[in-house]
Amino acid sequence: SEVSIMEERIYTIPLRDIMNNSKRTKRAPRAIRKIREFLKRHMKAEIVKLDNSINEKVWERSIEKVPPRIRVKAVKEGDVVRATLAE
């Protein structure tokens, strides 16, 4: 039987540059994309599943006002990373 190695990490992902470098109407979607890219790079995985809690946190104050940073708990099982809000 194949043993899946679980790897668990907590990251603080900076989103401040999104506020400065994107149009107001594109910030929240861009932040979500950045979180996904960050986790792909740091966890070395192709598939990244983001929990609804992350989505709600980013969209909390509408499309324009993204939080400056977000703490995320990422769990890697095989080649899939599942991320939830770290609280």
Image: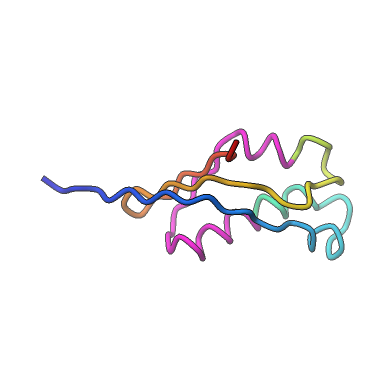
Give the x, y percent position of residue 40.
50, 60
Screen quadrant of the C terminus: top right
Screen quadrant of the N terminus: top left
| Position above or below: 25 against 46 | above
In this rendering, would 83 be left or right of 5? right
Image quadrant assignment for residue 84: top right
Give the x, y percent position of residue 61.
83, 37
Residue 45 colored in magenta in the image: yes
Look at the image and give the residue range highlighted in magenta.
34-58
Describe the colour scheme in one phrase: rainbow
Q: Residue at x 72, y 52 (%)?
A: 69
Q: Main secondary structure of the magenta part?
A: helix
Residue 76 colored in magenta in the image: no
- Give the tally of numbered discs: 0
Q: Residue at x 68, y 48 (%)?
A: 70
| Position above or below: 21 against 2 | below
Q: Residue at x 81, y 52 (%)?
A: 26
Of residues 11 and 51, the one nearer the viewer is: 11
Give the x, y percent position of residue 27.
80, 52
Of residues 29 and 66, the one nearer the viewer is: 66
Image quadrant assignment for residue 15: bottom right
Give the x, y percent position of residue 36.
58, 54
Q: Residue at x 47, y 51 (%)?
A: 9
